[in-house]
Every structure is written in structure tokens, then in C-alpha cells.
Amino acid sequence: MGVERFSFYVFVDSTGEKEFVYGSKPYSAFENAVNKIDPTAVKKEYDKSLEALFAKFSTLTAKEFSELSGISREESEQVLDELSAKGNLQKFTTKNGAIWSLTKSME
């Protein structure tokens, strides 16, 4: 298969053509791989609000929240920290950075 490192993702079309994405890459790298395999693929829109994202994902890092919400990395961390200070999110600090989880409704 030609795999040289981990992690990797393999996208395969109906004819067996393959497109690989190696390592930790931004969302755009995955979009590009899908578009190479199927140029007619249409991106599905989704609710990018903080409430919808935490309803879908139990935890998010600032980078993940930034990618999914479409706001800058710096603004993402600020928003998440503010909601943590208000008690809406719980922040866990790890050696690899912070991760947030929903503690109560944000209404």
C-alpha cells in the first residue's frame, strides 16, 4: 500500500485510485484528498455554533474548535476560556494543551 508512517488516511474511489493523507494535517488536506478522488463531491454545510459543536462532540481542543467553527485559533481559545470562567465549559490542561467539555447549557 506504500504506507511509510503513522497516522495516515487512505481515500479510495470506485476504480481503486488512492489518495493518502499522512500525519496530523489541517481539514483542508482532507478536503483536497476527497476532491482528488471525487471532483464532483459537494461539501455539506453544518451548524458551526459553539452550542451545536459541543452537542456533537463531547470534548474539543482550541485547534479543533477553530477548524470546525471557522474562527481564528486565538479567538477560539479566548471564547473557550471565557465560557470556562463562566462555568459553561470545563477546561482540562494536559501536557499537550487544553481540552474543553460542556458542563451546562449555554443559554
Image (cartoon, rainbow, N blue to C red):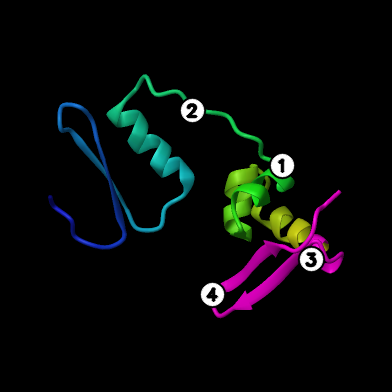
| Sooner in the amino-acid sequence: mark 3 or mark 1 | 1
Residue 99 part of the magenta segment? yes
Look at mark 2 in the image and give the residue it sits on. 43
Please report contact status of discs 1 and 2: CB closer than 8 Å, yes or no: no
Look at mark 1 in the image and give the residue it sits on. 49
Disc 2 on helix, strand or loop?
A: loop
Query: What's the amino acid at mark 4?
Result: Asn
| Sooner in the amino-acid sequence: mark 1 or mark 2 | 2
Which sits in the foreground, 69 or 47? 47
| Sooner in the amino-acid sequence: mark 3 or mark 2 | 2
Callout 3 crowding tier (Cα within 10 Å): few <14, some 14–19, many ≥20: some
Residue 54 part of the magenta segment? no
- CA gap, disc 4 and disc 3: 19 Å
In the rendered structure, which segment of residues is drawn in magenta?
Answer: 83-107
Q: What x and y, as percent, mark residue 50? A: 72, 47
Residue under the point 28% across and 62% down: 6
The disc at residue 83 is none
Callout 1 crowding tier (Cα within 10 Å): few <14, some 14–19, many ≥20: few
| Sooner in the amino-acid sequence: mark 1 or mark 4 | 1
The disc at residue 84 is 3
Disc 3 on helix, strand or loop?
A: helix
Does 105 appear above or below 41?
below
Please report contact status of discs 2 and 4: CB closer than 8 Å, yes or no: no
- CA gap, disc 2 and disc 4: 31 Å
Query: What's the amino acid at mark 3?
Result: Ser
Asked which quadrant contains residue 16, the reply is top left
Query: What's the amino acid at mark 2?
Result: Lys
